[in-house]
């Protein structure tokens, strides 16, 4: 597991998430731990290293 810190696209608070390094690329929805809005998370790993990360607001 890899802990990654980023800003919520809604409330701009810094939050952290544990990411699974065994999955090369994935996209999923996770709620912000501060404002509870849904965030589309897309991490990408290569050789257990984070090479790309997007945290986008989900248009409701």
Image (cartoon, rainbow, N blue to C red):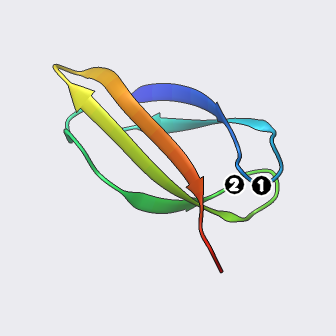
Q: Position of residue 2 (x, y in %)?
A: 41, 26
Distance between the Cα atoms at labels 2 and 1? 9 Å
Q: Which residue is mark 2?
A: 32
Q: Nearer the viewer, residue 13 or 21?
A: 13
Q: Is residue 20 visible?
A: no
Q: Is residue 1 left or right of residue 37?
A: left
- Label 2 crowd bin: few (<14), some (14–19), many (20+), radius 10 Å: many
Q: Is residue 9 left or right of residue 53?
A: right
Q: Secondary structure at mark 1?
A: loop
Q: Nearer the viewer, residue 17 or 51?
A: 51
Q: Is residue 32 left or right of residue 45?
A: right
**33 up-or-down from 47: above or below:** below
Instruction: Please tell me the numbered disc located at residue 44.
Output: none
Which-is-in-front pick, marks 2 and 1? Answer: 1
Q: Is residue 50 left or right of residue 55?
A: left
Q: What residue is drawn where x is 40% and y is 48%?
A: 42
Q: What residue is drawn where x is 34% and y is 24%?
A: 50
Contact between labelled residues 1 and 2, with CB atoms less than 8 Å apart: yes
Of label 2 and label 1, which has the lower sequence position?
A: 1
**6 up-or-down from 11: above or below:** above
Q: Position of residue 14 (x, y in %)?
A: 75, 33
Q: Which residue is mark 1?
A: 10
- Label 1 crowd bin: few (<14), some (14–19), many (20+), radius 10 Å: some
Q: Hey, which quadrant is residue 10 in on the image?
A: bottom right
Q: What residue is drawn where x is 20% and y is 35%?
A: 22
Q: What residue is drawn where x is 23% and y is 21%?
A: 48
Q: Position of residue 26 (x, y in %)?
A: 29, 51
């Amino acid at each position: 597991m890899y802990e990654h810190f980023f800003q919520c696209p809604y409330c701009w608070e810094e939050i952290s998430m544990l990411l699974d390094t065994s999955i090369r690329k994935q996209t999923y929805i996770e709620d912000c731990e501060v404002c509870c809005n849904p965030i589309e998370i897309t991490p990408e790993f290569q050789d257990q290293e984070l090479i790309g990360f997007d945290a986008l607001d989900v248009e409701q």
